[in-house]
Image (cartoon, rainbow, N blue to C red):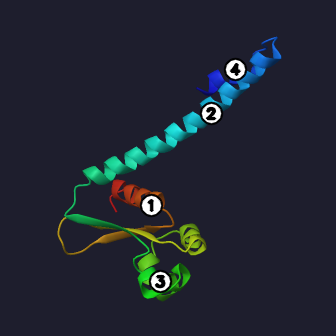
Amino acid sequence: MSDLIQRLRTRPTGDPYLHMLVHEAADAIERLTAERDAARADAERHRWLRDLKCCTFTLSRDDGHAANYMSASEWIAEHPEWFQDTPAEEIERMRSANTIWSLQVYPNTPVGSIEWHGATIDAAVDAAIRAMSEGQ
């Protein structure tokens, strides 16, 4: 697709109006390609959650700190052990956004869970996908 966009942008048309239309078309193709790629990633996350073979899982947003009238920063500082496996960059994003998404999975039994956190639903699910594909 990028080859097509490049050819559209560099091919001489000889007509200023046609030139403008071709560049607008190339811009639209780039935008639609980015939207398609984002939708594809969202669909992959959805299918992963749908097909997750586990006893149970819970996906939540801000259920810890917001319910306790605390900021995400305060919650993270009060419960550092819950976030010890979360990368520092993601913790900073959670603090900046004042949002904590959590995905808690009980893999085989209703006892003993694994939990991942992120500033966005995408970050939390992606962390779980990476960890579970690596066998963690």
Q: In the rendered image, which residue does mark 3 sit on?
A: 80
How far is mark 1 from mark 3, CA to CA?
A: 20 Å
Percent across and percent down for residue 23 are: 72, 25
Query: In the rendered image, which quarter contains the N terminus?
Result: top right
Residue 45 sits above or below residue 92 on the image: above
- Spot occupied by residue 29 in the image (x, y as percentages of width and height): 61, 29
Q: Which residue is mark 2?
A: 30
- In 3D space, how far apart are the residues under numbered discs 2 and 4 (Cα atoms)? 12 Å
Amino acid of disc 1: Ile
The front one of 108 and 92 is 92
The answer to whether residue 107 is visible is no
Q: Residues within 10 Å of mark 1 (few under 14, many from 20)?
A: some
Residue bearing the label numbered 4: 8
Classify 43 as above or below 121. Answer: above
Mark 2 and mark 1 lie on one chain; the one further toward the N terminus is: 2
Which of discs 4 and 3 lies nearer the camera? The answer is: 4
Q: Residue drawn 36% across and 70% down? A: 115
Q: Earlier in the sequence, mark 2 or mark 4?
A: 4
Q: Which residue does the numbered mark 1 point to in the structure image? A: 121
Above or below, 37 against 121 in this view is: above
**Nearer-N-terminus badge (1/3):** 3
Do residues under tags 3 and 2 come within 8 Å of each other at their CB atoms?
Answer: no
Other residues around mark 3 within 10 Å, as few (<14) / some (14–19) / many (≥20): few
Q: Secondary structure at mark 2?
A: helix
